[in-house]
Image (cartoon, rainbow, N blue to C red):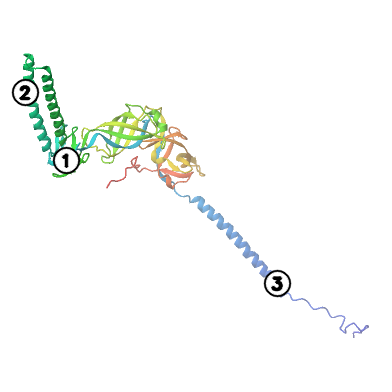
Amino acid sequence: MNIVAENKISGQPIDNKAPKRPVRPVRWFIIVGTLLAVLVGGLVWFNSFRGQMIKQFFANNKPPPTPVSAAEAKSEVVPNLLTAVGSLVAVHQVDVSADVNGRVTEIKFEPGTRVEAGTPLVQLFDAPEQGDLANYKAQATVAQLSLDRAKQLASRQFGPQATVDTAQAAYDQAQAGIAKTEALISQKLVRAPFAGDLGMRKVEVGQYLTAGTAIVSLTDLSELWANFTVTEKDSGSLKVGQTVRLKVDAYPGRTFQGKITTIEPQIATDTRNIRVQATIANPEKILKPGMFVTTTVVLPEKPAVITVPETAVDYTLYGDSVFVITEKKEEDGKTGLSAVRTFVQTGNRVEGRTEIVKGLKAGDKVVAVGQLKLQSGAPVSISTDPAPPIPAQPPRY
């Protein structure tokens, strides 16, 4: 039996033990925590495993080398050429015209034919001049007879010398009238000033022509001038007598040759260019005045330089460059080829090859075709396909 000694003490038995806390919630938290730890650890391990497998996949799965066409940098003597553009001009070309006014009475030529110097082309109305010529000839006849009689009388002392002088003056005046009228008549007959080919007719019978009106064009095609300009910098290398090669669009693949005959002594102040004229023989008469021509002046040879195909050079705003093919060792110990971008300094371009002033040496292999899909250091392989012709000629339609 329990005895309560104080009022504040509850009346519970002393030997009763305190109730135990429930065990189930603690186990539950332990189990859940363990599962979460296992799950997080599994995720971390999976991500690490996946990263390693991806890295291993890409390490063992490299893309194949890019096939390219290669060319070798050569040391060679290239032609020292100066290229410019210009046009052809006939040495002798004129629009034939009349010196005086008159009506066309006869056309004596056929358009497009060749004529010799002095060939009559057009006759203008000259009846009044022909009448004046007959009058002056009659006066000359009478003056000649009067002069002869005056000389005979003067020789016999039957006439004064003044009569002889008057008769001589009358005769000379008649002869002057004949000469003047014949000159007027000759102006009414238009002739070819030189030998050449006629163009299209520009007049008709009965048409009244004023002085200077074009009748027909006359061109001598046996010899032409090629007029072109070069820069002030290149003017010092030009000399009279140097060979000039010409190409025209009308005859692709064919080269014509001439020589420099005139160099303008003055340089244009607005363009700083100098005009040059070359003379070209045209025996076949296939070159025509007004044709656009590409001229190439052959200059004295320069020392040997390094050259590569023109297609091997990549021209950009940051500079000119080429892809140099080099050998490198892979991680597995094998040797492979790679293309490394190398900046160079270029010079002239002649016949499909580019002069390399700085950046390459003879024997270096460069990518000639296929560099547009490359990056510096990319693996490459030498293609066995033939390279396109250099320079590439576009198809003609």
Whether label 1 touches label 3, CB < 8 Å: no
Quarter residue 277 falls in? top left
Q: Residues within 10 Å of mark 3 (few under 14, many from 20)?
A: few
Q: Which residue is mark 2?
A: 145
Query: Which amino acid, mark 2?
Result: Leu
Percent position (x, y) of residue 280? 27, 32
What is the C-alpha distance between the residues marked 2 and 1? 36 Å
* Mark 1 surroundings within 10 Å by alpha-carbon count, few (fewer than 14), some (14 through 19), many (20 or more): some
* Label 1 or label 3, whichever comes before in sequence order: 3
The residue tagged 1 is 102
Location of residue 316 in the rendering, given as x and y in whole percent from the top left corner: 45, 43
Mark 2 or mark 3: which is in front? 2
State the residue at coordinates (23%, 36%).
94
Please, which residue is most extreme toward the right here? Answer: 5
2 or 3: tag closer to the N-terminus: 3
Identify the residue position indicated by label 3 in the image. 27
Q: From the top left corner, tell me how far across and down residue 159 is, in percent.
A: 8, 17
* Farthest-out residue, top: 156
| 321 with respect to 394 (left or right) | right
Looking at the picture, which amino acid does disc 1 mark?
Gly
